[in-house]
């Protein structure tokens, strides 16, 4: 297979972990006879510093001309003035909107060897294997916003349409069909009108999938049950802001945000693949970041954008093997494990995929 991958490291540890994910993809491609070409571009704070805008036209053009996008993270203290007119996060939000990346998939699967890395009791965590499908181009993050009354009143507008809700809910049902056949739709229908529309639409879509069990759950109840009974969830589908918050909560089930990948999908094959963690400026440039979430995001890239299921499984198995053999990065280190830096962990996974 031939494919072009846009690489957007972003800021902070995004630069380091993306380099390791690219290293693993390149090693796998060489070992399996694929031709992957990589081209880098700026986004976020790095783009603001270089070009004055968070999403340069050149970056958007590259992404549109590519088969998939490997992304790091954006932001950091340097650009963290909430009053600034230009912010790094604007670049990522605009990229999602421009490319129609409406469905964000965030798998949370507990690796048994890391069960003690989480703050949750092992008996509660046992068997956790869920996916959150987050709607990514609507809701509060894209609604009209502003200040009035001389700046003393602020507002953000949450807007959703039936087509926006229906398409992401169908993604969840199609995903559940290949898993444990259960979908949980999360909303705040007891308070919000957008959530009432969300619930009505989700319930109607559910009728098209009678073989899949379905439930509605309020977001506050879902937040509680993710900690109380995480293993009972299969596929969770929800709107943009709720999904943002719930997936960060769910990341703690795995013991570290450094372990969790994500895929942001458009219609067709195009997708953007990124670890769910941020730029971690406190450890940036110190070879301390965990690259496994970025590497597992690369596995999702192979699966969803390139259709290379076997290769995706090879990468995931390499991560599992490294962990099973006791290798850890500092965020998941435990007594008796061998701690590796960012680059060394990337080297190890690349070596394992070559040997697979």
Image: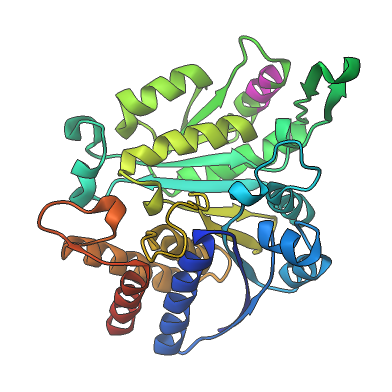
Q: Is residue 348 above or below residue 219?
A: below
Q: Is residue 214 above or below residue 189?
A: below
The reply, left or right, for residue 210 in relation to residue 83 is left
Find out whether residue 196 is within the magenta segment.
yes
Q: Is residue 99 above or below residue 341?
A: above
The reply, left or right, for residue 128 in relation to residue 137 is left
* Residue in the picture at 49% in, 72% down: 19
The reply to whether residue 218 is visible in this rendering is: no
* Residue in the picture at 41% in, 83% down: 27
Region of the chain picked out in magenta, as a range: 195-201
The image shows residue 317 at horizontal and vertical percentages of 29, 66
Viewer-proximal residue, 299 or 143?
143
Which corner quadrant holds the N terminus? bottom right
Find out whether residue 140 is within the magenta segment.
no
Which corner quadrant holds the C terminus? bottom left
The image shows residue 92 at horizontal and vertical percentages of 69, 52
Give the quadrant of residue 201.
top right
């Amino acid at each position: 297979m031939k494919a072009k991958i846009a690489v957007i490291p972003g800021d902070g540890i995004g630069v380091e972990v993306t380099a390791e994910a690219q290293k693993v993809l390149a090693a796998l491609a060489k070992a399996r006879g694929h031709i992957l070409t990589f081209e880098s571009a700026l986004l976020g704070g790095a783009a603001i510093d270089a070009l004055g805008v968070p999403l340069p036209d050149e970056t958007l053009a590259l992404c549109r001309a590519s088969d998939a996008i490997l992304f790091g993270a954006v932001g950091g203290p340097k650009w963290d003035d909430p009053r600034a007119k230009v912010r790094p996060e604007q670049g990522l939000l605009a990229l999602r909107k421009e490319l129609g990346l409406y469905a964000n998939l965030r798998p949370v699967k507990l690796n048994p060897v890391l069960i003690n890395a989480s703050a949750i009791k092992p008996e509660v965590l046992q068997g956790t294997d869920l996916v959150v499908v987050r709607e990514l181009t609507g809701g509060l993050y894209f609604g009209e916003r502003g200040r009035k009354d001389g700046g003393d009143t602020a507002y953000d507008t949450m807007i959703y349409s039936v087509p926006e809700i229906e398409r992401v809910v169908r993604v969840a049902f199609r995903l559940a069909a290949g898993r444990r056949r259960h979908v949980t739709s999360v909303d705040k229908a007891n308070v919000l009108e957008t959530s009432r529309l969300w619930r009505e639409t989700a319930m109607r879509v559910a009728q098209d999938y009678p073989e899949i069990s379905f439930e509605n759950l309020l977001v506050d109840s879902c937040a509680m049950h993710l900690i109380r009974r995480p293993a009972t969830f299969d596929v969770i589908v929800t709107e943009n802001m709720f999904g943002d918050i719930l997936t960060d909560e769910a990341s703690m089930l795995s013991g570290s945000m450094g372990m969790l990948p994500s895929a942001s999908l458009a219609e067709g094959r195009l997708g953007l693949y990124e670890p769910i963690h941020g730029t971690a400026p406190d450890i940036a440039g110190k070879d301390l970041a965990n690259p496994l979430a970025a590497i597992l995001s690369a596995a999702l890239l192979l699966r969803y954008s390139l259709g290379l299921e076997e290769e995706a499984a090879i990468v995931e198995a390499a991560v599992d093997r490294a962990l099973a053999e006791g290798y850890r990065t500092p965020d998941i280190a435990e007594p008796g494990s061998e701690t590796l830096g960012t680059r060394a962990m990337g080297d190890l996974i690349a070596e394992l995929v070559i040997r697979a």
